[in-house]
Image (spheres, rainbow, N blue to C red):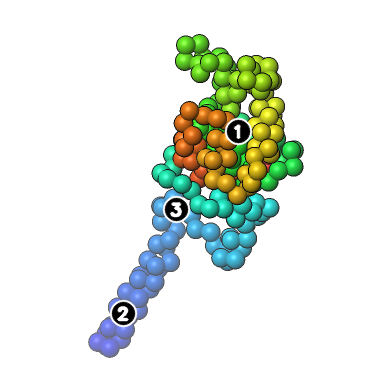
Amino acid sequence: MNTTILRKSVLGIAGLAFAGGLAAGPLHHTTTDTVDARPVAAVQADKADKTAGVDAGKLIPHGVQGAQSRIDLDPEQTTNAKAIIAATKKAGLDERAAVISIGTALQESKLENLGHLGDRNDHDSLGLFQQRPSSGWGSPEQITDPQYATTAFLKGLRQVDGWQDMALTDAAQTVQVSAYPDAYAQWEQQAADLVTQHWNNS
């Protein structure tokens, strides 16, 4: 066989094998990562749809104060956060009021609708906002109802002049009169994240 023909045949077979390997390679690729093949604009639009109607500028108008805390929420705590948002919307208030409310409840109860805790109870404090029947917040049954408790908190918030422009911890403290007035600040970012996530489905 002619040497030139033999060389061309060998190179041709090698080229086919290499090309076949490239073509077959992705078919045997085992990674579980997925890539969104849609145009970037479509991906961004889809993400925007999920938070449409949430005014991000109102959530934390002056930035967070101090180190932030965060907890993982179970389904009940998430349901309580959604109930606070729903009550806020029903009261005709905006996202900032929801951030203040959720931040307050995160500090007071970690978004757990607490009943009487016996010796661990702070006086007769109950519910998401640890409101006290003896202080006129309502009956035990009322203040352990998330909608009622949120509405009562918001009623107090509305009586605070300039609450919309106050730091969360100042607005919350004016309503709650806590022994730890600065403790609310640490929950502002998680509260804002929850409002962003659930405002449109609560």
Q: Amino acid at mark 3?
A: Asp
Between disc 1 and disc 3, whose residue precedes?
A: 3
Q: Alpha-carbon distance for marks 1 and 2?
A: 83 Å
Q: Secondary structure at mark 3?
A: loop
- Disc marking residue 33: 3
Which quadrant of the rendered structure holds the C terminus?
top right
Q: Amino acid at mark 2?
A: Leu
Question: Label 1, on which residue?
Answer: 175
Task: Find residue 165 and report its horizontal and vertical position in percent.
Answer: 60, 49
Task: Find residue 96 and report its horizontal and vertical position in percent.
Answer: 62, 46
Residue sitting at 70 percent across and 27 percent down? 148
Which mark lies nearer to you, 1 or 3? 1
Which mark lies nearer to you, 2 or 3? 3
Residue lying at the far left in this picture: please name it.
Answer: 3
Residue lying at the far top in this picture: please name it.
Answer: 118
Q: Secondary structure at mark 1?
A: helix
Residue sitting at 68 percent across and 37 percent down? 159
Which mark lies nearer to you, 1 or 2? 1
Question: Label 2, on which residue?
Answer: 11
Q: Is residue 59 visible?
A: no
Q: Amino acid at mark 1?
A: Val
